[in-house]
Image: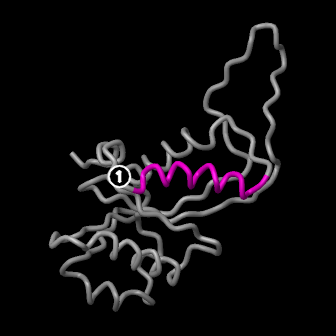
Amino acid sequence: MDEVHFQQHGSRCRMWVPPEVKDPVLLHAWTHKTIGYWGAVRLRDGKLVYRREEGTFEGPTCAAFLGQFYRASTRSPRRVVVISDNASYHHSRCHKEWRAERAKRFELSFLPAASPDLNPIERVWKLTRRRAVHNQYFPTLHSIAEAVESTFDDWAGPNETLRRLCAIH
């Protein structure tokens, strides 16, 4: 489980330019506007569970996403262990009691500080950027949300790509 921001100005990862073009131009929306998402992948089937965050990432919004992920993940009798980074809102007191009540079936396991490479969802964010936002111009924040959510919706059901991408060996 983790959160991510996608910036309206997009990004470049690869660019092919004909040799006769000496000064290539790639349009960007020069803004600091971003859109945020909570996300988690069920490792047993690769299903992505996500939620757009309109405000800031904080304890109550984390609690709302944890509830959503709990409902999506505990339909079978299996125990769910959620891997999360050490962001303060993941430890928030506002959902501490809720986590304690569900700890036998739904546990948060926290990664060491400053170790984002250990969190499998980071690979999903990287793939999403590559598939949805690299080398594209987004004139509005809504247009980037459509592109990102279209990619997320492709992964809303059981998905072998994400299951393998996030597999812990």
Q: In this view, does 26 lie above or below 139?
A: above
Q: Residue at x 44, y 51 (%)?
A: 122
Q: In this view, does 108 lie above or below 40?
A: below
Q: Residue at x 59, y 43 (%)?
A: 132
**Quarter of the picture holding the N terminus:** bottom left
x and y percent of residue 95 in the render?
Answer: 41, 87
| Depth check, front residue: 55 or 88 | 55
Residue 18 occupies quadrant: top right
> Seen in the image, is 3 located left or right of residue 55?
left
Q: Which residue lies furthest to the left in this view?
A: 77
Q: Is the magenta stretch mostly helix, strand or loop?
A: helix
Q: Residue at x 52, y 46 (%)?
A: 128
Q: How crowded is mark 1: few (under 14 residues within 10 Å), some or many (20 or more)?
A: some
**Quarter of the picture holding the C terminus:** top left
Span highlighted in magenta in the image: 140-156
| Depth check, front residue: 55 or 110 | 55
> Seen in the image, is 147 located left or right of residue 90?
right
Q: Is residue 136 above or below residue 45?
A: above
x and y percent of residue 9 in the render?
Answer: 74, 47
Residue bearing the label numbered 1: 118
x and y percent of residue 51 in the render?
Answer: 51, 68
Is residue 54 on the magenta stretch?
no
x and y percent of residue 111 in the render?
Answer: 34, 63
> Seen in the image, is 54 located left or right of residue 97?
right
Q: Is mark 1 on a helix, strand or loop?
A: helix
Q: Label 1 amino acid?
A: Leu
